[in-house]
Image (cartoon, rainbow, N blue to C red):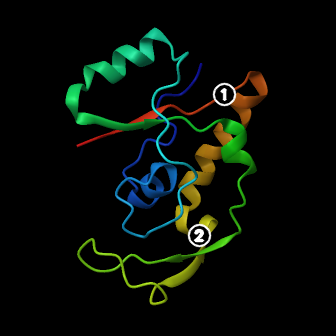
């Protein structure tokens, strides 16, 4: 059984990294939104459509992309005050590992187990 609560959190840093959504930290995203996969299941398509106009920035990184990413690489976290990014050079250097936090890596381990069963991707979208 595939859990439906994997990566189920309101973490704006994660949103920024996954799809450049609410990217207040100006974290370099793993990719820009790709849309729903062409071969998404009927259930995923129904769920997405049930959100109506509130659903946006749908995308789908593969398990391999997420598991092989260099989480020890550094970037400048430019999160400022009141949702405004700080100027370049005035943020704090951090690693993706520290930025994403331990909860993300717990979910990533669940994803690792799923990937061993069959090719896996994470399909998601955001709401307004």
Side of 61 where 73 appears, left or right: right
Point 69% across, 29% down: residue: 114
Side of 124 where 118 appears, left or right: right
Q: Work out whether mark 2 precedes mark 1 in sequence or the reverse, and give the earlier one.
A: 2
Helix, strand or loop under label 2: helix
**How far across and down, in percent of the image, does residue 81 sit?**
28, 80
Helix, strand or loop under label 1: loop
**How far across and down, in percent of the image, does residue 120 sit?**
66, 28
Point 66% across, 46% down: residue: 66
Q: Callout 1 environment at 10 Å: few (<14), some (14 to 19), or many (20+)? A: some
Is 117 drawn above or below residue 43 in the view shown?
Answer: below
Count of numbered labels shown in the rendering: 2
Is 87 drawn above or below residue 102 in the view shown?
Answer: below
Q: Name the residue under label 1.
A: 120
**How far across and down, in percent of the image, does residue 127 sit?**
28, 39
Q: Mark 2 points at which residue?
A: 98
**In the displayed image of the protein, which residue is found farthest to the bottom?**
90
**How far across and down, in percent of the image, does residue 72 sit?**
71, 68
Per the model, the C-alpha gap separating discs 2 and 1 is 25 Å
Q: Callout 2 environment at 10 Å: few (<14), some (14 to 19), or many (20+)? A: few
Point 58% across, 59% down: residue: 102
Q: Quadrant of residue 126?
A: top left
Side of 74 where 50 appears, left or right: left
Q: Name the quarter where the N terminus is drawn.
A: top right
* Tag 2 near tag 1, CB within 8 Å: no
């Amino acid at each position: 059984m595939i859990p439906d609560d994997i990566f189920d959190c309101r973490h704006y840093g994660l949103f920024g990294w996954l799809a450049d959504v609410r990217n207040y930290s100006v974290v370099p995203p793993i990719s820009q939104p790709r849309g729903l996969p062409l071969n998404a299941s009927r259930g995923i398509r129904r769920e997405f459509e049930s959100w109506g106009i509130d659903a946006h920035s749908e995308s789908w990184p593969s398990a391999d992309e997420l598991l092989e990413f260099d989480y020890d690489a550094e970037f400048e976290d430019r999160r400022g005050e009141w949702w405004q990014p700080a100027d370049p050079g005035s943020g704090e250097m951090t690693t993706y590992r520290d930025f994403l936090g331990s909860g993300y890596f717990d979910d990533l381990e669940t994803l690792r187990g799923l990937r061993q069963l069959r090719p896996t991707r994470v399909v998601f979208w955001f709401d307004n």
